[in-house]
Image: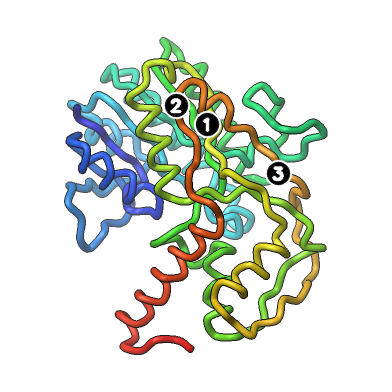
Amino acid sequence: MEILVTGSSGFIGSQLSQALLDRGYNITGFDSTLLPHSDYQTTKGDLRNYDDIDKALQGKEVVYHLGALADLNVCRTEPLETVQVNVLGTANVAKACRKHNARLIYVSSCHVYGYQNHFPVTEDSAPNPSEIYSATKLGGEKIVQNFPGGVRHTILRYGTAYGPHMRPQLAIRIFLEKAMRNENITVYGPGTQTRQFIYITDLVEGNIAALERPEADGQIINLPGPEGISILRLAKLCVEIAKSKSEVVLGPPRPSDINLEFISSEKARFLLGWTPKTTLREGLEKTLKWIQESTFNFQGTSNP
């Protein structure tokens, strides 16, 4: 099967591409930047340019559309570019999928649920995005679902992913790196905000199950982490795992911060036979080991 992965140079896209390749699929990446080393070919292009997408999609049977602006800080400061990349870019991908009769697996986010009053949150819960990023991801969902002429599709709503090769801007990596250096860790707001972090290999397995299970056609499916944890407890757990002397301090609240995240993965279990297997502690230990090894390899020394 010929598969195109947009956002293939990113944290999730690169590991999904490699896992698909290892399973015997023919993979082509598409991204605005190229990885220095990969086992699959990557086409450089811009999601906002339909011709780039149309050319890359020729001969492809499936498209995983992960390409997006996803850094919340960047999205807040560059809202117009966020809309162009995440919404117009998705419309271009849908148009090309329609033209080439390719199946589209669109990557959305559990962030589209925003503020909720009833838990657990399921795929039937009404989205209520609180950020420009989540609003654009929901907009992409509506485009995929309602594209003229129809596009065969599956929509995956990711939880917050972490693990080796994660972006430096993500909270878990910040906490672990500060803990390695025995620096104070700042938690913004009261620290009671709960999140469900999902380890990267579990998330990749959920993506592949959505490809291989026909029951996923036309469905919206949550892929959250296995357990909720408060951000304050997360920071303290990172200190504990790193055997650090860091102190955890509270900072001012961040705008649009969701207090409670409790997302159900029951539909994924029922349709895909998928459940996240990696506990948060286990995933944090693996991530810390990767950070320590990367620091040693790149700097020639290990952190205390």
Left or right: 247 in relation to 252 = left
- Crowding at mark 3 (Cα within 10 Å: few <14, some 14-19, many 20+): many
Q: Residue 140 carries which label?
A: 1
Between the residue at mark 2 and the residue at mark 1, the CA separation in whole angstroms equals 26 Å
Q: Which colour scheme is used?
A: rainbow
- The residue furthest top is 149
Looking at this view, is 224 or 71 the one in front?
A: 224
Query: Which residue is under mark 3?
Result: 261
The kind of secondary structure element at disc 1 is helix
Above or below: residue 5 compared with residue 170? above
Please state the horizontal and vertical placement of residue 49, each as a whole percent of the image. 35, 39
Q: Distance between the residues labelled 3 and 1?
A: 22 Å
| Disc with the residue nearer the chain's start (3 vs 2) | 3
Quick one: label 2 or label 1, which is nearer the N terminus? 1
* Residue found 39% across the figure and 31% down from its top: 92
Read off the residue under disc 2.
Answer: 273
